[in-house]
Image (cartoon, grey):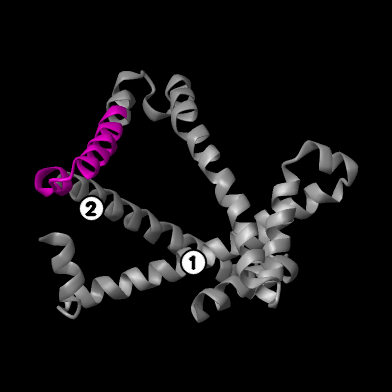
Amino acid sequence: MYLVSVIAGLFIVEYFFGNQPTNPLTIAKNELTLWSTVIYGFVLLYSFIFLIMGQVRTVAREKGPKRIRNSLVCIGAIIFFYTLSYVFPRGPSDPSYQTMYLFLVTYAAAARSVPWSLGGAYCCYRYLRLTSLEATVLTVAALFTMFRGTTVLTLIWPPFYGIGVWIESVLATSVIMAFVTAAAIGTIVLTIRGIAGREPGLIELEVT
């Protein structure tokens, strides 16, 4: 978490003071963003492969009908969208493919994120009772982010929109990029330790 905090702080400080391309903060942010994106792509591919392997193993080994049904739905969805990418003339960039993906996946994910957003703000208040600075910041940030998407409240007080966008585009993005960078560094360390035979438990669990 210390690494995440340091990287997130660097991104936030760069937003205020890194206006020049030759600024050391800007250079450091660009390098971290570039390498974290590259490594994130490999990690995402790795995760996707082992997701398929895990679902196939569940179907082959599990006896519970619910877990087998969920794995079959996941595998079927992967095959369905992969097949559609070859059916449409322009592949995944085809407008019809993107429209179908939008209606089937994006809206479902958006509907799922609504209770998460409400639950996040509620949990910050319910469990921490605004007794700490962290809980207060999380609650206020969650409220401003939700108010940004409401037409009525932004008409009553227009700064709701600007503050919510700033929280999402600067604070939240900086923390997300910091987590991605820290995860990328951790993945490299884990991979090196796995090659050196220092992580036998995790490697054997995933491969066998």
Question: Where is residue 87 shown, x and y percent of the image?
Answer: 31, 19
* Region of the chain picked out in magenta, as a range: 57-80
Sequence-first disc among 2 and 1? 2
Task: Please name whichever residue, 177 or 116, is drawn nearer the observer in this view of the structure.
Answer: 116
State the residue at coordinates (66%, 55%).
Answer: 168
Under mark 2, the amino acid is Phe
Asked if residue 68 lies in the magenta stretch, the reply is: yes
Few, some or many C-alpha atoms within 10 Å of disc 2 (few <14, some 14-19, many ≥20)? Answer: some
Front-lying residue, 151 or 128:
128
In the picture, residue 24 is in which quadrant? bottom right
Identify whether 113 is placed above or below 37. above
Give the residue furthest to the right: 156
Q: Which residue is mark 2?
A: 50
Specify the amino acid type for callout 1.
Answer: Phe
Answer yes or no: is residue 34 visible. yes
Q: Which residue is mark 1?
A: 179
CA–CA distance in space, label 2 to label 1: 21 Å
Residue at x-position 57% and y-position 67%: 29
Number of marks in picture: 2
Task: Determine whether, in the image, residue 146 is placed left or right of residue 186.
Answer: right
- Answer with left or right where residue 138 lies relative to residue 199: right
At numbered mark 1, what does the secondary structure look like: helix, strand or loop? helix
Name the quadrant containing residue 170.
bottom right
The kind of secondary structure element at disc 2 is helix
For the point 20% across and 76% down, the residue is: 199
207 is within the stretch colored magenta = no
Q: Is residue 14 visible?
A: no
